[in-house]
Amino acid sequence: MSKIHVSTQVNGDQVEFLCEPEETLLDVLRDHLNLTGAKEGCGTGDCGACSVTIDGRLVAACLVLGAEVEGSAVETVEGIGAPDALHPLQRQILQHAALQCGICTPGIIVAAKALLAQNPDPSEQEVRYWLAGNLCRCTGYDKIIRAVLAAAGEMRGENP
Amino acid sequence: MSKQEFKILGTRPIRPDGLDKVTGKAMFGADKSATGMLHARILRSPHAHAEIISIDTSKAKALPGVKAVITGADFDDVENRWTRYTMQNCMAQGRALYDGHAIAAVAATSKKIAGAALKLIEVEYKILPHVTDVDEAMQPGAPLLHEGVKARKLGDDVSGNTVGYYSFGHGDVDAGFAKADEVIERRFKTAATHQGYIEPQACLADLGADGRGALWCTTQGHYMVRETCAEILGIDASQLRVTASEIGGGFGGKTTVFIEPVALKLSQKSGRPVKLVMSREEVFRATGPTMSASMDVKIGMGKDGKITAGHARLRYQGGAFPYNMVMMGAMSAFACYDLENVQSEGWDVMTNRPKMISYRAPGAPMAVYGVESVIDELCQKLGLDPIEVRLLNAAKEGTKSSYGPRFKAIGLVEALKAAKAHPHYSAPLPANTGRGVACGFWFNFGGQVSVSMAINTDGTVNLIEGNPDIGGSRASISMMAAEALGIPFERIRTIVGDTASVGFSDVTDGSRVTFAVGIATINAAKAAIRELCKRAAMIWEIDEDAVEWVDGTARPTGHNAGDFPPMSLAEIAATSGKTGGPIAGHHEGAPDKAGVSFGVHLVDLEVDPETGFTSIKRYTAFQDVGKAIHPAYVEGQIQGGAVQGIGWALNEEYIYGADGRLQNPGFLDYRIPVASDLPMIDAVIIEVPNPGHPYGVRGCGETAIVPPLAAVANGVAQAVGVRLFELPMSPPKILKAL
């Protein structure tokens, strides 16, 4: 079967690519667009390390076909924060030492940003349930949850 | 050891690799590619035990796009038997020994073609009887994994799968049991659990026909990878340059090789770079989980809570090749206590399962689970407070440990006292809730280490070390360098060098990096300081011995030495080109005075009587770490270890069917703890300095996985009034017990 031509937006940039019908969005990002921030931890949608958003909706990029994102706006960790100013989530994760190996961190940041977009003032329990699809084996989640709550507070304009 | 004052140690700076890790720039194992690169895939055995009659790769080789196909026949024998086991675990020779054992591998121009080629490889198997349970594998007549490797001391009552036997202890346990007011003996079983790192094994190999090569891989020790691969491939270690990628978790699971020799061989055959990335299913089926265990623990106690004797018999299952890890369990089992009569014995047993590899405090959590459970039951029976009983029996400085040596300064009593005084221990408990307490122990390790430090002319410092940074060690090493030199943390950049950049370093394991690399860093700084003082003496035209280093500056030792204003590191470095050239310091060594570490965990948990589901309500972990260099990352180690232990206690297990196949090789069915399963984990750092480290560091990475198994089990026993003797305590098992 011949490849499929896809035209879409990734992190605000217009991109075009050719993909096999069975290639996932994660394959396309990593192998064709050289965006390796999203990680493959399982390939079955269980670990959340490949979390990205499509038109603002949080997805596991390993469960989406590359061909499905025609005409969409995809955001990955590489699109979060500016060169001179990290996103509050990125900054709070660093300040809280909320990573050890860092493999789950891109997915956590993308997923938490999607949460705060729809719920700017989540409870600890809401953060825990929202991030239940993002596995972290290093931290026990404690510092991640605290960092997300702190970032939410910062984004609401509260003093840290 | 007197309390030292520090300027930088104990602060919480942002880690130097942090920015790359929150922006997606950090390069992990699977993130690197090369021009002309091929993609590799591995064909794996669907059988638990089978003779490989034949492998026909002709159709796979004929598929357009396939550039190389290899099998076990492509690997020559190696002299060292332990390296041979590693090689035969990477690629089967003659027999498939477990479900998932590698049989053949393909390199092709795309992942898709490589996958299609695997389906064209024809393997004829003769299925053999298999065994996956440790007690069955020890029975005489059990299916045998390897001939001629049975432990010499053992008789005919155990099978040839029993490859190790160890015994530790002192005193007379029978006399001790006779003195007890209460003796309890229990049999325990714990399931095999996987390290569960989120990043699967991955590598990019490039090996030329001239025997020169480069390898990029995710590993806890790239020197180990270099030496193992060089031996297997028959090339010189100097010609294989191994670079450790950022590592996405290891927990012991990346202290050996699984795919690197395969990728190198495919590269050698095809003449092209080869990328090989494991799937999650492959990680579960073919990389090391930890051991499963079957154990008998007997403890005698007086009415006053004094333990009169303890005896543990540990039978560990470690998969398809010889190994020796039960020793660590036998040494750890009773290490928390000062006992007159104690004996622990251990048997290492092979089965048709993937070859075990270390998992955080390897061997200790299950043994300590058995001991801490029986102590808890004795406390219940005798109506004694579990922390008081542990305080009464706790090991302290001077105690002859159950495994032989006398302890130096240790912090178990301090941790127990902190736990007893903590508000958690006196908080009221609601209905269906139980409070569990348990202690834990781990040795920690020193090992070989190399550090190279360069002082730059702008007053900054580059430091190269050889241990992959698995949890923030570049930060703690930079902090120790800054403390030793007396300059700001930000002026130092620490990198993990490749195998051609800095001398040999042992694997990142045994909680050794902050301890051992720390000592090498401090000594490298001392060497640089000696040179800095020498240069200052030269500039001042005074004697070298008349210069000392104070707060990051060279100073005359006194008025007699001369009257000069202090000269900073930056000032001396700026003119180094005119005073003798670049200034540097390095250190190579094998520090061996790592300090043992103890922890005490408190857990409140609730058991739902209708579903059998256990939810953790509150968790506090106390641990003596000697000195916390970067307390936030020390807390992180304690929290992470505790949660892995909670997973082991409640959910995680390798499930084998009667056919010997692994039934749950994925994160959906092998369920590690998720954020919604847990409360905050309070980590309380205790600092009883290790006299064997200039700053008091013990190492902190592993101890925290040891207490949770028993702490959770003891909590469940308190909550429901019934004690389980098998892990994990999954909801169906708890429901059945109720």
Image: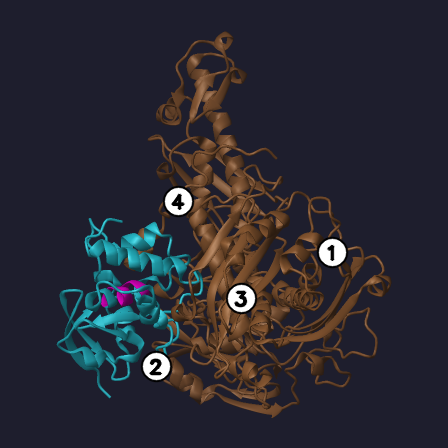
Q: Is residue B278 left or right of residue B392?
A: left
Q: Position of residue B120 (x, y in %)?
A: 44, 89
Count of number-bearing discs: 4
Residue B112: mark in rendering: 2
Q: Nearer the viewer, residue B90 or B442?
A: B442
Q: Quadrant of the N terminus of chain B?
A: top right
Q: CA distance from mark 3 to mark 4?
A: 26 Å
Q: Quadrant of residue B359 in the image? A: bottom right
The residue under label 3 is: B645
The residue under label 1 is: B403
* Chain for disc number 3: B
Q: Where is A66 relative to B600, above or below? A: below
Judged by depth in the image, the label closer to the viewer, 3 or 2, is 3
Q: Quadrant of the C terminus of chain B?
A: bottom right
Q: Position of residue B382 (x, y in %)?
A: 71, 65
Q: Where is B415 relative to A79, above or below? A: above
Dots 4 and 1: beta carbons under 8 Å? no
Please rate how many residues cluster around mark 2, counting C-alpha atoms within 10 Å: few if below 14, some from 14 to 19, many from 20: some
Q: Which residues are magenta?
A: A108-114
* Chain for disc number 2: B
Q: CA distance from mark 4 to mark 2?
A: 46 Å
Judged by depth in the image, the label closer to the viewer, 4 or 2, is 4
Dots 1 and 3: beta carbons under 8 Å? no
Residue B12: mark in rendering: 4
Chain brown in the figure, letter: B
Q: CA distance from mark 2 to mark 1?
A: 53 Å
Dots 4 and 2: beta carbons under 8 Å? no
Mark 2 or mark 3, which is nearer the start of the sequence? 2
